Image (cartoon, rainbow, N blue to C red):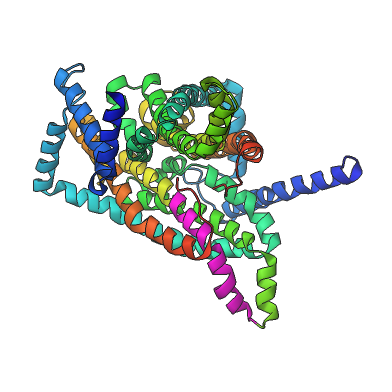
């Protein structure tokens, strides 16, 4: 597996991944060059690179990125910590689960953005409101998926574990949690997708730091190069978060514990 | 006590008319109790009755029907545009391995630049207008459509295509009778994801751009501090999605997944 052939294949993969972006940059550069779009309307790649340097140099950029990532991390961790135990508890009783499911469907639709007006009223403009919005975006979807996961475990498996002498705790740790894990992880991934978008929207409206705020502030001064820089960063950060962190975790869990399901 | 209570609940839930509504009645009752106890100030936490009154008032003034119509029309336009552009693009990308390898990273990247991140630059280009809202919505719907259509086309087994070809099918017939049916379940998934993201993008765009629509109503209520209208807006958003889900997505899924695809858990 390892060796020159492996290295060669890896290099080819990387080239295939990078090539489209190089072409995109070239087209972008040429288009701005030919059409003479003013900087107030659309920046050239060079302007964005300069904006990146300037912002990185003052440390403002890192502060914004840090603020956004920290909010997502805190909101998501809180939501996961609250929703999984609750989901397992609700899921173990089918009647209770049937009772909660329609309500949770309702709230998972409201994920994130729809809470912005109410959240800013309850918590004021700032950290509390944004954490609440991210929390909601993740909480209801993970809860819904946890219940779905637990209820989809065949009763036979639980009975089998019980009849082999497992106590309640062992059934929980060795049957229910692993069985529901693929659903839980899928829920986390979907929820974080909504949370990331909700975060940007919330930062535009309700705060004074973060990537969304950086974008909207730049709009006030027609600094399109900063806006495009922010957009690229939002995209790159999400690709990193989703493809390098969440997707592999989801794949492993499903391979290890679940049935193969199409990944949206 | 507990088992019999659960049994009663179970019987109640088994009734078809209450299957969906029952849990909501409970939540509304709980909400009413919390509101009546006045744990939170009334201005922050209104009762269900107040929200109902606000609903009646806004309905009779004709504001609400107009806003709902605006939002739903925008969503429909976005979905239509996304479908018309997204599916052919998805097929173009999915049909050839080379174009798939080339465009795949780009689609991934542009899908990742969350819809709302486009708002600031769109506001510079088009100002606070309907064009901005429409652009964001169409953008949001298109990428999941392209993504999933390409995925669907790629997932059609090569043997199927070859079998059709060896039976003398022309390229057009292969497209029409093999590739499109084979990709349909994925396309519907794309539509569901696209509409899900699009619905939220629409609300965000209406909140920020603010000309009309349910999102605008909610943010307008935020400015005047009217919690009642915010909650009303949230309830409407949830109900409208239920309607879209029950009347548009579910029938489509049933028609395509049952006929051509595998059964998947609904999310």
Image point 37% across, 47% down: which residue?
Answer: B199
| Furthest-top residue in this view | B39
The reply to whether residue A226 is in sight is no
In the foreground, B255 or B221: B255
Q: Is residue B88 magenta?
A: no
* Image quarter in which the N terminus of chain A is found: top right
In the foreground, B20 or B147: B20
Q: Is residue A44 left or right of residue A9?
A: left
Q: Position of residue A28 (x, y in %)?
A: 60, 51
Image point 32% across, 42% down: which residue?
Answer: B209
Q: Position of residue A99 (x, y in %)?
A: 32, 36
Start-end of magenta stretch = B169-193
Image point 48% across, 23% down: which residue?
Answer: A71
Q: Position of residue A165 (x, y in %)?
A: 58, 23
Looking at the image, is B177 positioned above or below residue A33?
Answer: below
Looking at the image, is B265 positioned above or below residue B92?
Answer: above
In the foreground, B12 or B83: B12
Q: Is residue A236 left or right of residue A90?
A: right
Q: Is residue B177 magenta?
A: yes
The reply to whether residue A264 is in sight is yes
| Furthest-right residue in this view | A4
Q: Position of residue A234 (x, y in %)?
A: 53, 36
């Amino acid at each position: 597996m390892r060796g020159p052939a492996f290295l060669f294949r890896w290099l080819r993969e990387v080239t295939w991944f990078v090539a489209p972006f190089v072409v995109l940059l070239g087209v972008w550069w040429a288009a701005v060059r030919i059409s003479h779009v003013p900087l107030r309307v659309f920046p050239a790649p060079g302007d964005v690179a300069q904006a990146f340097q300037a912002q990185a140099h003052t440390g403002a950029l890192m502060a914004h990125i840090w603020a956004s990532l920290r909010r997502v991390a805190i909101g998501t961790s809180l939501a996961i910590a609250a929703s999984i135990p609750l989901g397992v508890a609700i899921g173990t009783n089918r009647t209770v689960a049937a009772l909660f499911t329609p309500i949770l469907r309702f709230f998972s639709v409201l994920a994130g953005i729809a809470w912005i007006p109410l959240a800013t009223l309850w918590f004021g403009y700032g950290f509390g409101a944004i954490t609440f919005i991210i929390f909601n975006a993740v909480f209801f979807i993970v809860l819904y998926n946890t219940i779905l996961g637990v209820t989809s475990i065949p009763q036979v498996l639980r009975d089998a574990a019980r009849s082999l002498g497992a106590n309640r705790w062992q059934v929980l740790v060795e049957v229910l949690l692993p069985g529901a894990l693929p659903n839980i992880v899928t829920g986390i991934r979907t929820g974080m997708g909504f949370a990331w978008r909700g975060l940007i929207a919330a930062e535009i409206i309700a705060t004074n730091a973060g990537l969304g705020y950086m974008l909207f502030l730049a709009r006030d001064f027609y600094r399109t190069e900063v806006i495009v820089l922010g957009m690229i960063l939002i995209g790159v950060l999400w690709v990193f978060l989703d493809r390098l962190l969440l997707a592999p975790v989801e794949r492993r869990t499903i391979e290890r514990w679940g049935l193969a399901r199409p990944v949206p | 006590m507990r088992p019999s209570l659960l049994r009663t609940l179970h019987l109640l839930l088994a009734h078809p008319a209450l299957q969906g509504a029952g849990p909501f009645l409970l939540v509304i009752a709980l909400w009413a109790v919390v509101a009546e106890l006045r744990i939170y100030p009334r201005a922050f936490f209104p009762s269900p009755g107040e929200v109902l009154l606000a609903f009646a008032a806004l309905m009779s003034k004709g504001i609400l029907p107009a806003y709902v119509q605006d939002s739903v029309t925008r969503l429909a336009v976005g979905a239509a545009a996304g479908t018309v552009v997204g599916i052919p693009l998805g097929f173009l990308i999915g049909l050839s391995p080379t174009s798939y390898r080339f465009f795949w990273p780009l689609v991934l990247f542009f899908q990742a630049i969350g819809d709302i991140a486009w708002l600031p630059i769109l506001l510079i280009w088009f100002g606070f207008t309907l064009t901005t809202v429409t652009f964001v919505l169409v953008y949001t719907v298109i990428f999941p459509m392209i993504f999933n259509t390409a995925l669907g086309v790629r997932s059609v087994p090569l043997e199927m295509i070859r079998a059709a070809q060896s039976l003398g099918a022309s390229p057009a017939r292969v497209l029409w009778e093999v590739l499109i049916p084979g990709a349909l379940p994925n396309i519907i998934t794309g539509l569901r994801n696209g509409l899900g993201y699009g619905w939220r993008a629409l609300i965000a765009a209406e909140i920020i751009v603010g000309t009309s629509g349910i999102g605008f109503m909610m943010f307008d209520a935020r400015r005047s501090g009217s919690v009642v209208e915010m909650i009303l807006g949230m309830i409407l958003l949830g109900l409208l999605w239920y309607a879209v889900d029950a009347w548009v997505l579910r029938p489509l899924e049933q028609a395509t997944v049952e006929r051509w695809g595998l059964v998947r858990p609904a999310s």
